[in-house]
Image (tube, rainbow, N blue to C red):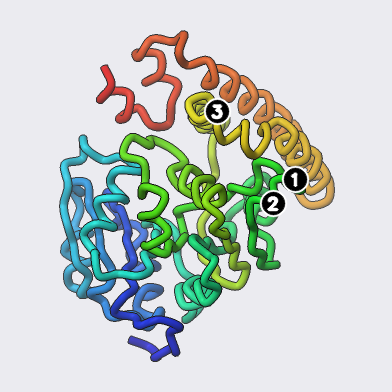
């Protein structure tokens, strides 16, 4: 390990869960970044879905705990809940995806620092765009993950609506007692399990902390088809979880603000992408509307339209 930070809680009570599938391409950046965080290697729990590369051996050589699961059983909510249950002595569980690279020596420490406030049940960190990212990808990260930290409560729904529950399990941490108090991760969550938990915590008078100084590098250069599919999944998620919209507000208003911000950003920084951004906006809207009406679609169509076809195959 590269340094020994001063943890606000016993580091033996902190676990970092990383679901993986063929993570090999990310390991040259990920493993050194994990080593720099100052946690014992055994505190990293790798939950692997039958990878066919050598990544599991690399994680074991690093010293992490590796647990294999049947790829067909992976579920964004249920798999994370089982991982939490594998670490019953942990007070804080950090969720990290295999392509989210912690920046600096104290990314996890700064995230965990949020729990010095006893009202904080969940915290999530800042996601920076990849170095190769162009304007659309960069704007999404810089807008959704600003440098300024904040703590949100249920009262903030009057100010920012559905954005109150915005968070990401690409880099997030949970107080395990708070997570258990709201029922844990939902077993059948194919998408946005983090926002479901955040909403329940806020309703239960917990607070959500955004830590702008706890950074990972993590972004995606989606194609237009992938944008459609991702927003199809968002539409399904909101359609199936109307209580989030009823409690925190509809997503359309936030979407319009994002579009205006994106166009202004591209005008200044990457104007050649303006036509692409406008077409993508239409693709997102069409995907969202179709997803919100998924009850009228056959399972075969859902498999074609979703970014999570494995979920729908299990439903057929």
Residue identified by numbered label 1 = 158
Of pointers 2 and 3, the one earlier in the residue sequence: 2
In the foreground, 176 or 132? 176
In the foreground, 242 or 105? 242
- The C terminus is located in which quarter? top left
Of pointers 3 and 1, the one earlier in the residue sequence: 1
* Snapshot quadrant of residue 97: bottom left
Callout 2 secondary element: helix
Contact check, label 2 and label 1, Cβ < 8 Å:
yes
In the foreground, 116 or 314? 116
Q: Is residue 131 visible?
A: no
Residue 29 percent location from the top left of the image: 40, 68
Which residue sits at x=24%, y=51%? 82
Callout 3 secondary element: helix
Callout 1 secondary element: helix
Q: Is residue 111 visible?
A: yes
In the rendered image of this protein, does residue 234 appear above or below residue 177? above
Residue 162 percent location from the top left of the image: 65, 41
In the rendered image of this protein, does residue 7 appear above or below residue 83? below
Contact check, label 3 and label 1, Cβ < 8 Å:
no
Which residue sits at x=62%, y=67%? 212
- The N terminus is located in which quarter? bottom left
Residue identified by numbered label 2 = 155
* Snapshot quadrant of residue 250: top right
Residue identified by numbered label 3 = 242
Horizontally, residue 165 falls left or right of residue 6, namely right
């Amino acid at each position: 390990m590269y340094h020994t930070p001063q943890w606000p809680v016993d580091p033996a009570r902190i676990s970092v869960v990383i679901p993986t599938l063929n993570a090999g391409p990310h390991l040259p950046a990920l493993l050194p970044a994990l080593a720099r965080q100052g946690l014992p290697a055994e505190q990293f729990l790798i939950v692997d879905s039958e990878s066919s590369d050598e990544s599991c051996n690399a994680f074991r050589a690093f010293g992490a705990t590796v647990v294999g699961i049947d790829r067909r059983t992976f579920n964004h909510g249920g798999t994370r809940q089982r991982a939490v249950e594998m670490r019953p002595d942990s007070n804080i569980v950090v969720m990290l995806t295999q392509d989210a690279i912690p920046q600096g020596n104290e990314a996890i420490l700064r995230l965990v620092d949020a729990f010095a406030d006893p009202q904080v049940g969940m915290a999530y960190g800042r996601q920076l765009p990849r170095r190769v990212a162009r304007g659309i990808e960069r704007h999404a990260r810089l807008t959704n993950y600003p440098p300024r930290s904040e703590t949100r409560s249920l009262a903030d729904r009057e100010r920012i609506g559905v954005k109150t529950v915005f968070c990401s399990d690409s880099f997030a941490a949970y107080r395990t007692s708070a997570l258990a108090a709201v029922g844990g991760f939902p077993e059948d969550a194919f998408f946005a399990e983090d926002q479901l938990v955040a909403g329940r915590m806020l309703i239960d008078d917990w607070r959500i902390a955004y830590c702008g100084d706890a950074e990972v590098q993590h972004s995606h250069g989606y194609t237009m088809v992938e944008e459609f599919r991702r927003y199809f999944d968002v539409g399904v998620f909101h359609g199936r979880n109307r209580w989030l919209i009823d409690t925190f507000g509809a997503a359309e208003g936030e979407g319009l603000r994002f579009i205006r911000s994106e166009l202004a950003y591209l005008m200044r920084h990457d104007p050649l992408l303006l036509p692409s951004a406008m077409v993508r906006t239409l693709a997102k809207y069409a995907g969202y509307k179709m997803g919100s009406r998924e009850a009228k679609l056959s399972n075969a169509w859902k498999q074609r339209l979703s970014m999570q076809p494995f979920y729908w195959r299990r439903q057929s």
